[in-house]
Amino acid sequence: MAPPRSSGSTDPGWEHGISQDEKKKKVKCNYCGKVVSGGIYRLKQHLARISGEVTFCRKAPEEVCIKMKENLVGSQAIKKHRRYEDDDRASFDLPSNDDNEETDEPGDSKVKEGESDKCSIICATPLRSPGYVDPGWEHGVAQDARKKKVKCNYCEKIVSGGINRFKQHLARIPGEVSSCKMAPDEVYLKMKENMKWHRTGRRQQSESELNSFLDNSDHDEAGEELANGGTEVGHLLGDQLLVPHKGRKKRLSNCSDPETNHLKSQRQLTVSESKKNCDDDVILAISKFFYHSAVPLGAANSPYFHQMLDLISQRGPEWKCPSLHLLSGPLLQEKRAMIKGQQLETRATWMVTGCTILAERSTDLDDPNGLKFFVSCPRGTSFISAVSGSDIAEDPHGVFKFLDKIVEEVGAENVVQVVTENSPLFRAAGKLLEEKMKNLFWMPCAAYSMDLVLEDFLKINYVNEGVVKAQKITQLIYNHSWLLNLAKDFTSGDELVSPATTRSASTFVTLGRLLDCRSALKRLFQSSNWISSRFSHDCEGQRVQNLVLDLSFWKAIQSIAKAVDPVLQMLLKLDRDGGIPLHRVFYDLHQAKLAIKETHDGEAVPFIAAFDSHLGSLLHHPLSAAAYFFNPSFRYRPNFLLLPEIVCAVNECITHMEPDSGRRVSASMQIVDFVSAKDNFGTELAVNTRTQLDPAAWWQQHGVSCPELQKIAVRVLSQSCCIPTKLGQSSVGPTLRRRHCNRLARKLTTDLHFVHCNLRLHDYEVPATVTANAAISSTVAASSDVIFLDHLLSGWLASPEEQVEDGDRESPFAEIVEPLDFQHEGGAADIDYFGNG
C-alpha cells in the first residue's frame, strides 16, 4: 500500500494544468486546452484517459498518461487506508443522495437517528468516485448558493428542485417538471440514459457497493463484539442497514458474522434473480398475448408495436390499458374519421392530377377471390373498400359491376385509368369498363405482369434444369445444421437463399446469390471438414460436391442469370421503391427487351416470347407511350425514340382525356411548342430542371403557355401502374363475408378493415426507421426471415416430393434460433412449446 502523502505535498496533476478559479474546481489542460470541471482529480482522469466521467485528452504524451494512471491508483489506495485507519469514526463516508447532488465533491452522508428506536439508518447509495460532478451541470447554471435552482442553457427556464429535477427537464420526463423543447437531441438522449440508470439501477448497484465496502473493512472490533453476543446488534431490513447505537457509533464488519453474511449473499442473489425473473415475466406475457390471440408473429416487427411498448414504459405501472369498448368504439371511430379527413384533403387535388383506381385480389387464405380497391395519386395511395369473392363468382361482368361502382364513387371525371392484374378475367372486365367510359383506360399491373414473365422463364427447359440442380445444393445444406454452420464460415455468415416479393423472384434472386457464393462453396466442398464428415460419403453429398465443382454447371447458371436479370432488376426496384412511375415504364421496358436480345442472340426467342406475352400490352399501352413522350428528361434527349406508335398514343390520350373538341385542337397545336422548346419550355430554368424536377411538377411550372396540353400532360405523368404488394394478410377481412352477422358487427368489421389497410399503406409508402428495440443480430434476423418466408423459397429448403415427419430431420435453424429457457429451480421447463406434455 502506498504511504500517505505529507500535508504539504503538491498534487502532480498541477504540472499539467492551470487552475481557472479560486476554488480550483476548473482546470485547463496544458495539452489540448480543454477546461475540465471537477478539480485536479477530474483533470488526472482526463489525462489518464479513464472513460465514464470526462473526455479523453488525445494530445497528452504517453508518459503523462501512464504517470497519471499510476497516481490515481495510488490515490485510491491512500484514501482507502485513511478510511480504515480511524476506528472511532461516527458514521460511514458514503456519497450523498440525489437530493444533495448539487455539491461538486461527495461529502459524508448524514446518519438519520430515529428517536423511538434509537437506530441509525444508512441508505445504500451508489459509491461514486471522488470529485464526481453530475453531467447535468454541463447544461445549466446554479442560481443560488445551495444549487436548488438551476437555469437551463437552452430555454433559459429556471428549474426548482436541484440537479435531479433539472435533468428531468432536459430528458423530457413528464410529471414533475415541464420539458425542454430546445435542448439538442444528443443532450436529451444523454440525460434520458442518465435518468434511466438513476431510476432502475440505483438501488441494485448501491446494495452491491455497500456489501463490498463491508467485506473490505479490516476493523473487527465491532464485528467481534457482535459475534460474542454484544449489546450492539446490527441487522438488515429491506433495503437499509439498521445500526443500533449507544453513545459513540461504531462501524460494522459483517465478515465475522456468518448469519449476516448469509443474509447479505442471499440478498445479492435475490436482486440478480429478481431482475432476470422480471425480464422473463415480461417476455412470457408478451408471447402469451401473441399465441392466445393468434396475432401474426410478424407484428413483432411493427413500428407501432415498439412505439406502444416505449410509451407504456414511460407512463409506468399506474397506466391502464384501454377497454374493449374504447378500442371498438370511440378510438376506432376517431382513427377512421382522421383517415377520412386525410382522404378528403387528397381528393381536392384529383381535379388537377387525376387519379388511378387499383383493384387487387385479396391475400386472405379463406377468401382468395375477394377484391380490394384503392385510389392512387401523387399524394399517396388510400384504401377505399373490399368485396367478397362470392359476390364476384369469377365473372367478368361481376368484376365490371364493382369497378364501375368504385369509379362512380371516386368521380368519373377524376379517374385517368384503372389498374388490375393481367389475367383474362380482369382484361375482359377492363374492356367492358373502357367501352362504357370513354374518358379512361384499363392497364395491367406492371408488377403482376413482370412476375408472370419470370414464371414463364422458369418453364424454359434449360432454365428449369439449372434451377433444379441448384436447389439440390441448398436442400443439402439447409437440412443439416452442422453443414449450414460450416457453410456460413465460408460465406462470412451470408445466407445462400434469399426471399423476394414473389416465389419466382425469390428463385432467381437465390440463383444469383449462389452464383456470388460459388467460390466459397467450392472451398467448402474441398475443405478438410467436409472431406472428414459423414456427408461426403453419402450419395447425395457426393452428387452435390460434383455439381459444385462442375464448371459447366456454373456457366449455365451464369447464362440464366444474364437472361432474366433485366426483368428481375425492374421487379426488385419496383418493390424497393414502392412502385414504378408511369413516365418510366415505356423506357425501362424497352431497354429490358433490348438487353434480353443482346444477351442471348438466337437463343433469346423463348425469353422474348414470354416478355411480349405479358409485358407487351403494358409496353405498347397509350398511357405509357404518351408518358414517355411528355417526360422532359426523355423527350429532349438526342436518342429519343420518336416511333409512330408514340405519336398515335399521344393523340389517343388527347381524345380520351379532353371532351371538348376545341380544346383538343388547341392541345394538338401546342405539341409543336413543347417539342421545339419554345416560350416557357425553352427558358434557362426549364432546361436546367428537365432532369431535376418530377415531370408532372415540371409541366405545372413551365407549361403555363400551353394550358390545354399542360392539363393533359400533368394528368398522364401523375399516374402509377402498380398495385401495393406489401399489405399482407388481414385477420379482419373474413368477417366481411359472414352474411348472418348483424348490422353493427358488419359495420365494426368494415371500419377495422378500413383503418387496418390504410395504416399498412402508410407504412408501405413511408418505411419506419430502425429503433433501438430492434437491436438484434443480423444473422439471426436473416435466418428468421428465411423461416417465416419459406413459402417464397419452396424447393430451395426441401424438395417438393419430400414429406418429412416430425423428428425425422434436424431443424436447419436449430443452432441459430433457440427458444427461451424458462425453468424451475429443479431444472424442468415451465412451458412445453411443442405440446408433448
Image (cartoon, rainbow, N blue to C red):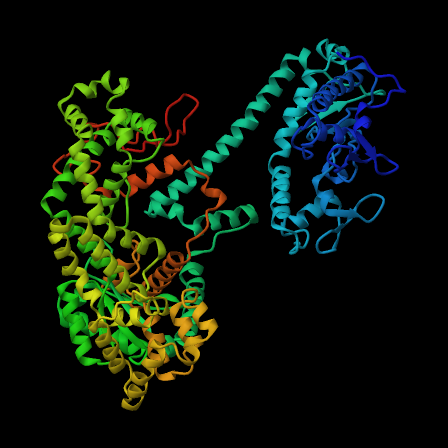
- Residue most toward the left? 461
Q: Looking at this rendering, what residue extends furthest in the front direction? A: 638
The reply, left or right, for residue 59 in relation to residue 539 is: right
At x 60%, y 50%, the residue is 185
Residue at the far right: name it: 8
Residue 451, above or below 792: below
Q: Position of residue 235 (x, y in %)?
A: 69, 21
* Quarter holding residue 317: top right
**Which quarter shows the C terminus?**
top left
Which residue is located at x 42 percent, y 59 percent? 327
Q: Can you say which quadrant of the picture contains the N terminus?
A: top right
Q: Position of residue 735 (x, y in %)?
A: 27, 60
Asked whether residue 238 is in view, the answer is no
Rendering coords of residue 805 (x, y %): 17, 31
Q: Is residue 195 above or below residue 247?
A: below
- In-front residue for pair 650/435: 650
Residue 524 image offset from top left, x and y in percent: 27, 25
- Depth check: give the residue in front, 537 or 232: 537
**Nearer-the-camera pick, 137 or 34:** 34
Residue 150 sits above or below residue 700 on the image: above
Number of marks in picture: 0
Q: Residue at x 82, y 15 (%)?
A: 4
Instruction: Mark yes or no: residue 337 visible.
Output: yes
What residue appears at the point 37 percent right and 79 percent down from the top-left corner?
Answer: 710
Question: Is 261 left, or right, of 122 in this rendering?
Answer: left
707 up-or-down from 288: above or below:
below
